[in-house]
Amino acid sequence: MGKPLEVHEFEAITCEQFDTINYGKYQLSEKEFFELESFIEEYNSKCESADVLDFMRIGFKRNVGKYITIKNYVGLIQMNNGFQVQVLPKIDFDDEDADADNSETKALFIKMLRSLKNFPGKIFSNANLSVGRMILYEIFINMYLQECWQLVKHGIKSSYVEQTDNLNYYKGKLLVAEHIRRNIAHRERAFVVYDNYQANIAENRIVKATLLKLQKLTNSAENSREIRKLLVSFEMVESSGNYEKDFSRIVINRNTKDYENLLVWSRVFLMNESFTTFSGSTISRSLLFPMESVYESYVAKEMKKALTPYGWKVSCQDKGYYLFDEPRKKFALRPDIVIKKDGRTVVMDTKWKKLIPDERKNYGISQADMYQMYAYSKKYGNSDVWLLYPYYSEIQSLNNKVFKTDDNTTVRLWLVDLKNIEENFSLLRLELEL
């Protein structure tokens, strides 16, 4: 498997056969470009729940031909021919050369992912991992292996498994009809059903099957070594031969809590499912994450850490208000973040969008976003609403910019510096408490 194409959101990918002016920083051969284009078109024709324009966009430019830009989703796409596209979030590091190998971007992206409630990688540590040299898929494999080590450390679970056998001694319950059929000439035997306490349970079979599959997929010597060590702990366990059947047998409870994160990963790896589902004849597997959700979750988590010690109550996806109340409540309002202190309420919404330094184009802020904030202001009965966009050096003058209406509704912009988020939110707190 060759080195993947590593791109950032919003950057153009062109076909080297047609791009005569080097419009795209990233160029693919005609075959690879066609594979990626086919994936986009197939997704567009099959997906009914989302707009392909929210994910990938195909454009056309003179002397360039077609070009592809990827936005709002970050992760890894692997085509059936083995070609990989690795999409990283666009994060500002001020100096373009400050993160030339993308190691800082990858490390920050993994940190952001761990804030997602349903993301199974919260114990992941990259302290001894060469993140900059690893593709995302290898990093995700390493996450799975670290979860496995936590399980082994706590002890893999065993359980009573119902088993039938024709024994030379009596054990459990005699299955009379089958006993007569099998043992009419063998009175010394008994066909019985009994409970056997063993580690060969559905949870362990799924984990072993995942480890065996990852052993074939990984190109990392470190991951291969860890898989070999882990398989020793599962020597007495069979590999799952029917994933769906074994998954259906699993119930997460107090006794199997240690398997919860592992099984989410196992479903992704074994069944080619993704945290965002893309499928089709041109794609073999994908691990894609909607950056809107990642950004919102990370900002909310860090804001709680920054504001809670100072008496602020921070809630996420606040419920209770509707745009219309009569004749029935309609169109629920769900601001991303609501913070309260001493009777004061501040409503905030996160937007994973790159603003532009152009006042004539409203800095790239959509009317829909402003209408949404105005509705929040009226329903929450306060004029203090904030829009939180990611920081980019070329728009730093927009930080804390204020928009006012004639009825005193105030919308403030705040640029979240992801690489210095603790310091950034300390400044935000000071602004809130002025």
Image (cartoon, grey):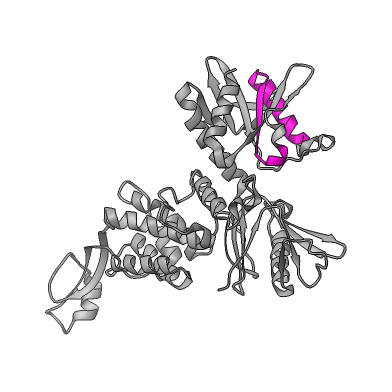
- Residue bounds of the magenta highlight: 366-395
Viewer-proximal residue, 270 or 373?
373
Residue 376 drawn in magenta: yes
Answer with left or right where residue 263 lies relative to residue 425: left
Using the rendered image of the protein, determine whether residue 325 is visible from the camera's viewpoint: no
In percent of the image, x 52 and y 28: which residue is there? 314
Q: Quadrant of residue 327?
A: top right
Residue lying at the far right in this picture: please name it: 62
Q: Position of residue 289 (x, y in %)?
A: 58, 52
Q: Position of residue 213 (x, y in %)?
A: 44, 70
Viewer-proximal residue, 245 or 55?
55
Q: Position of residue 317 (x, y in %)?
A: 57, 33
Residue 419 to residue 161: above or below: above
In percent of the image, x 82 and y 34: which residue is there? 359
Residue 235 drawn in magenta: no
Residue 80 to residue 393: above or below: below
In percent of the image, x 88 and y 63: which residue is there? 62
Residue 2 to residue 384: above or below: below
